Amino acid sequence: MALDKSYLEYPKRAYGHDHDFYDWSMLTDRPKVNWPDDKKLAVWINTTLEFYPLNQRNIPFKTPNGMTMPYPDLRHFSLREYGNRVGIFRLLEAYKKFDVTSTFAINTHLAEKNPYLLNRLLKEDSEILCHGWNMDHLHYGGQDIEEERELVNKSVSRLRELSGQAVRGWLSPAKNQSENTMALLAENNIDYCCDWINDDMPYLFKTARGNLHVMPLSTEIEDQFVLNNNLHSEDSWAEQVIDAFDYLLKEAGEQGGRLFALNLHPWLVGQPHRISSVEKVLAHIMSSDEIWQVTASDILDSFCGQS
């Protein structure tokens, strides 16, 4: 029996991709972007501060980088908290040493329970972006939309209240989303999301609730991915970050402005045996006079002003 003709019809089949979330284009075919003062490479250093509950729920899957031992897993709980008690201050010293402006992604639950930490970050000339409620409140496919709507609204509105900032950006815990997350972010007037990592430049993302931009925050060179997942050495991580930076800087000189985004976790690279690797990376990056090193929102605003 022959298949019905409709079986082979796919209304969203098109050149490039099969959805309409964003327009298809090759990076090399897009208009060249020019960063302020004719700088070639926009550099975004992102510092991620997280709270992992000791009694995690693991819904709908085990919390990435969370507790792994039987309750109470104090070994992993205290290691994660080390970043918020000690590691972050080593990173702040490194940023001061190399004149780095970091953007800080923070769980709203952490900002609420540790006001001293948020107040310290607010002393920096920077911006705060929302990293969801905490690392055990995940966004996932099939999640009830009203449940997720409440979670997004609580996370964003409370962080705006606590920080006194506009809070324009969002980074999902574990970079995990549902089919509704981007629309719910637009609903809450979020300007950019860092979860999608399929580009080297910002791009416009369309939803039924309004548009926002994707600001790709590279996973491939972030500390957690290279050190914890791939089990590479600190020297290898630093080498990979520097290679990525050098390549993008060279490409920017040939094809127009590019974005270099580096994500750091204080509980991981704020350790005494790793902070020297961070300083090595920052020294290399900040020694270039061809970079524009600012916050994520500054980069987005410049990009939008040219598109």
Image (tube, rainbow, N blue to C red):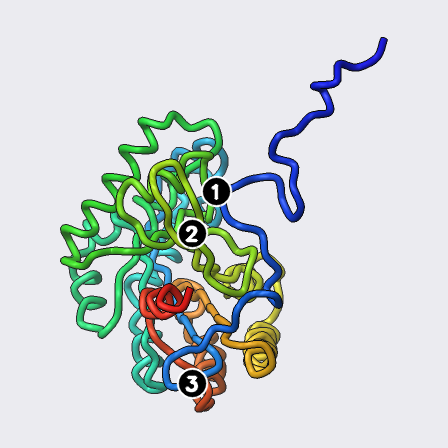
The CA distance from mark 3 to mark 2 is: 45 Å
The quadrant holding residue 38 is: bottom left
The numbered mark at residue 69 is: 1
The numbered mark at residue 76 is: 2
Q: Residue furthest right?
A: 1
Mark 2, other Cα within 10 Å: few <14 / some 14–19 / many ≥20: some
Identify the amino acid type marked 3.
Answer: Asp
Q: Earlier in the sequence, mark 3 or mark 1?
A: 3
**Horizontal and vertical percent for residue 138?**
40, 39
**Horizontal and vertical percent for residue 265?**
41, 63
**Horizontal and vertical percent for residue 241?**
55, 74
Identify the amino acid type marked 2.
Answer: His
The N terminus lies in quadrant: top right
Label 1, secondary structure: give it.
Answer: loop
The answer to whether residue 193 is left or right of residue 112 is right
The answer to whether residue 62 is left or right of residue 220 is left
The answer to whether residue 195 is left or right of residue 9 is left
The residue indicated by pointer 3 is 38
